[in-house]
Amino acid sequence: MSVRFNGLVLGPLAALALAGCQETTTTAARPRVDAPGVPVSVQSISGAPDQVTAHFAGLLGEAAAERKMEIVPGDKPARFRVRGYLTAQPTEDGQTALAFVWDVYDESKKRAQRVQGESLGKRGGGGDPWAGIDQTIVAKAASESADAIASFLTTAPVPEPKADAKGKTRTAQADTEKKR
């Protein structure tokens, strides 16, 4: 019994074989999530050289805007504040990993969530692991960071409205003022 393969079978197999030659990520692919209306302040990004941090911050801002996240300056009211850390390190197979960790803090300054991930870069050159991190990997890490933070924001519980001195909630008081 002979089996014949046509282009419909060989084409996808060739594509899969070639895909194995591409750069990969060690984090599971996260679906893109939109998180509108939740004010977030990025407090810090540390661990990387200044030029990598600046590039990452710009890409993170773009990724956040695409996901409709409301990024506010550090001195403005925010429901959550995030602090990030980037690190580059060689892997056992000779590539370089760009890892990110984000601690998300609530209004009471308690850590509400930690999100983390890693993207693989090209093979490092010499003793500086940052030399193996290119713009594509920085962009991928920024996008994955925005996805992870937005995923948390969409599942975070909404805080109870705070009561003012008269016992009315802010929401009820606003409704009363609207009726006037």
Image: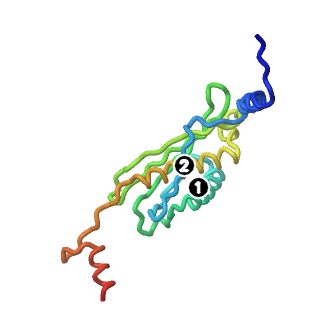
Q: Nearer the viewer, residue 148 or 47?
A: 148
* Residue 80 drawn at (x, y percent): 41, 58
Name the residue located 27 percent from the left edge and 78 percent from the top edge. 173
* Residue 119 drawn at (x, y percent): 61, 39
Alpha-carbon neighbours of circle 2 within 10 Å: few (<14), some, or many (≥20)? many
Is residue 180 shown above or below 173?
Answer: below
> Is mark 1 in CB contact (under 8 Å) with mark 2?
yes
Q: Nearer the viewer, residue 18 or 11?
A: 11
Report which residue position mark 1 lands on: 60
Name the residue located 50 percent from the left edge and 67 percent from the top edge. 73
Three-letter code, disc 2: Ser
Furthest residue to the front?
Answer: 1
In the visual, does 179 lie left or right of 102? left
Is residue 178 shown above or below 104?
Answer: below
Furthest residue to the top?
Answer: 1
Q: Nearer the viewer, residue 29 or 112?
A: 29
Give SS at disc 1: helix
Report which residue position mark 2 lands on: 145
* Residue 22 drawn at (x, y percent): 72, 35
* Rendered-image quadrant of the C terminus: bottom left
Give SS at disc 2: helix
Earlier along the polypeptide chain: callout 1 or callout 2? 1
* Rendered-image quadrant of the N terminus: top right
Asked where in the image residue 165 lies, by quadrant, the reply is bottom left
Name the residue located 62 percent from the left edge and 58 percent from the top edge. 58
Image mark count: 2
Three-letter code, disc 1: Leu
Q: CA distance from mark 1 to mark 2?
A: 7 Å
Alpha-carbon neighbours of circle 1 within 10 Å: few (<14), some, or many (≥20)? many
Q: How is the image coloured?
A: rainbow
* Residue 150 drawn at (x, y percent): 49, 53
